[in-house]
Amino acid sequence: MLTPRASRRRTMRSTATAAAVTAAVVALGAGCSADSLFTDVKSASRSYNVGNDDQRIRTLDVRSYAGDITVKAAEPDRRTVGVAEDMEYEKTKPHTEHQVKDGVLRLTSDDCGGNGDKCTVHYTVTVPAALTARLRTGGGDVTVRDLSGSVDARTEGGDVVARTTSGRLHARTDGGNVRLTDVRSRDVDAESGGGNLRGTFAAAPDRARLASGGGNVTVRLPRGTYAVDARTDGGTRDVSVPTDREAPHRVTAQTGGGNVTVTGRD
């Protein structure tokens, strides 16, 4: 039979043990999500080259169910397209395909059979700089670098990032941000359903439109005079570049609720 003092000691030990277990669980939960604790996420990857002198690729068309797409320019003398696919999934491995027809390389990935599990394919594609790129993903970021061909990049949920492009540039995201850095593209059309847009131009565009449903829009331009249409339904408007309605360089910056800034880059 336990004495009152022994009973109190046992109760104190039990309480301390329970507290230690609780602290361990809390610490574990702070560093890991429930998905990472109980879900076995698998990975796979493959890489390959497409095209040659007899099968010249002129257009890249990527259609991904989910995952990031990165397209970057290769060295000047390269004529083939290099593709790397990095997959993450739970039960069913994504099915990917590539095919070439009439100079168009199409890359596609599916939804792992539609079972609702994690299913992403991250594409990294190295291309001749002058290639035309049409890029679509259902849920990742799209990044393009150093391309001189036309680019049409769209994502349903991630960001669109373009660096040092010089061809026509169209960018769309349903809810992410758009970041354009040191672009020389003369025709730019960028839009987000609710994120921020930031465009820094290394050369004056002939036409640039940056629009958001509710985020901030910032445009940084080289020295020159611009025909500027800057509008916001709820934020502040700041235009600090020389303006002229008849200027050949036309810039539209608009948002449904954020701030609009059009300024020089120097």
Image (cartoon, helix red, strand yellow):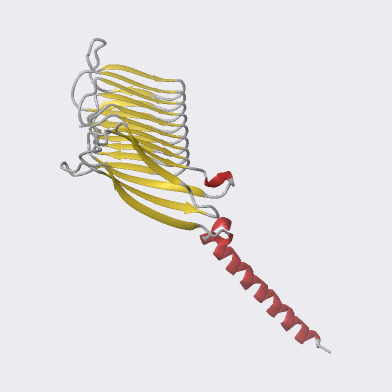
Say above or below: 31 vs 62. Answer: below
> Residue 49: image x %, image y %?
29, 47
Say above or below: 85 vs 128. Answer: below
Residue 168 shown left or right of residue 171 in the figure:
left
Identify the residue shown where x is 47% and y is 53%.
88
Say above or below: 65 vs 258. Answer: below
Q: Residue furthest front?
A: 54
> Residue 245: image x %, image y %?
26, 11
Q: Which residue lies furthest to the right in this view?
A: 1
Quadrant of the frame with the C terminus: top left
Identify the residue shown where x is 77% and y is 83%.
7
> Residue 208: image x %, image y %?
30, 22
Quadrant of the frame with the N terminus: bottom right
Determine which quarter of the picture holds residue 188.
Answer: top left
Q: Nearer the viewer, residue 36 or 93?
A: 93
Residue 65 shown left or right of residue 101 in the figure:
right
Identify the residue shown where x is 63% and y is 68%.
22
Q: Which residue lies furthest to the top in this view?
A: 246
Q: Which of 121 and 262 is in front in this view?
A: 121
> Residue 44: image x %, image y %?
43, 56
Residue 167 shown left or right of residue 117 in the figure:
left
